[in-house]
Structures are given as structure tokens and as C-alpha cells.
Amino acid sequence: MSLSDSWIDFSCLIAFLAIWYGYAAFARRAAKKRESLSSVLIIYRVDWMRHLLERENRILDAALMGNIEKNISFFASTTLLIIAGTLTALTSAQSIHEIVQMVPWVWPQTLDMIQIKVMTIICILIYAFFKFTWALRQYGFASVMIGAAPNADDERATPEMKKVFSVNAGKLIDQAGHNFNSGMRSYYFALSVVGWFIHPLLFLALTVVVVRILYIREFTSRSLKTLTDGLSMSQYYLDNQNLKFKK
């Protein structure tokens, strides 16, 4: 493997990180100006908290929160198992290198480069684990807020107090949702790194494909259209139409 080959590999890695960060920044800005899953879901989350205050029995809300936390806990624990698997692959880098050397059309790479590629996947998974666990904690914070919510017949709770609670509780759940979404994105981008073991250009091509898939799902999917069409029943959205989708 020549020095130029190494530079191509590292250049693709830098491009990969730039694309990942660039898409995340783009998604945050775009969500403030147009319909997206994140900009629509926060409206539903605020409405959920508003309706929670009107219910005397909140078993449904507790069940929903528990189900969400269980799903995130599954991804967090699964990520740990995958990290353990990739660490095993790191110790077997020599075997991976030997297999790669036997395939004539695979990009030439040294043992050190194989280890760097495995370490890249490990770092992405560690990032995902931190995002999942932070989202899990934030949902725990939201559960505390729900537990402290005033009862439906509490005369001391003014309409303004209820409005403040529903908005803040909804935003806290939304923040947890964003962190969970970041963890899921990490999984998608980690899959594109697999193409790096074959060829740097395939690595970049798969990264672009991942970005395309994420964009379609977040900004043009049928699920988004269904959620957007349902906003006509949202009181929070109707009361704040002048804000559009800005958060």
C-alpha cells in the first residue's frame, strides 16, 4: 500500500465525518423552516402533555413512556453487545487483513488501516451508546415531570401554569427524541463504513446513500405527510400557526 493510498483513505474518512456533521446541521436548520419529522413531532408531544393534564387516569401516559424507554433501553444494550463484537474483530484484525489480501479487486490496505477502520466503527457505536443513554435519562426526567403534573381537578393550577407545563414537558421529551434520533443515525452511518473495507469510493458512495435515505425519511416520507395532515386536530398548532414550524 503506497502513501497516496493512505491519503485517499484518510481523505475519505474526513469527507465522511464532514458529510455526517453537515447533514446533522442541515437537518436542524431545515426543521425550523419546513415540515420534518422533528418539527411536527414536537407539536404532537406538546399536545400529548396538554391532554395529559385533562385526564384523571394517567395509566395510558405511563404505559406510553414505559414503552418508549424500553425501546431505547433495547438499543442501548444492543449497542454494547455490538461494541463487544467489534472489539473482538479488532483483536482479529490480522485474520481480516489476510482475507482482504486474498481478494484481488479489494482496495490495498495495511494491517494498521484495517485496525483504523474497525476503530472507526467502534467510535461511532460508542457515540451512539452515549446518545441512547442520554435519551433514556431525559425520558426519565420527563417521567418525573409527568409525575409532578397537577391533577385535572387542581384548582390552584391556572391555565397559564398548565400551558407552561405542557410546552416544557413536550420540549423535554422532544430533546430526548432528538438524542435517540442521533443514535439511530449513527447506526446508519456505521453501516456505510463497512464499504470502506472494500474501497474508499464505495465508502463515500454508501455515505451519500445513507444521507439520501435519512433525508427522504425525515423530510419527504409518507409518515411525515400523514403526521402533517393530522395537525388540523392539534390545538397547540392552531394556536401558534404564526410560528409555523419554528421551535
Image (cartoon, rainbow, N blue to C red):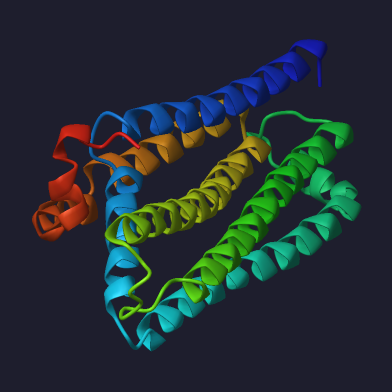
> Residue at coordinates 21% horizontally, 52% vertically from top-left?
236
> Residue at coordinates 32% horizontally, 56% vertically from top-left?
163
Q: Nearer the viewer, residue 72 or 206?
A: 72
Q: Nearer the viewer, residue 58 or 36?
A: 58
> Residue at coordinates 24% horizontally, 33% vertically from top-left?
34
Left or right: 103 in relation to 90 = left
Q: Quadrant of residue 87?
A: bottom right
What quarter of the picture does the C terminus occupy? Answer: top left
Q: Would residue 51 be seen by someone viewing this image from the given angle? A: yes
Q: Nearer the viewer, residue 69 or 241?
A: 241
Left or right: 175 in relation to 111 = left
What quarter of the picture does the N terminus occupy? Answer: top right
Please state the horizontal and vertical placement of residue 114, each as a whole percent of the image: 80, 38
> Residue at coordinates 34% horizontally, 88% vertically from top-left?
57
Q: Quadrant of residue 120?
A: top right
Please state the horizontal and vertical placement of residue 190, each as a whole percent of the image: 61, 46
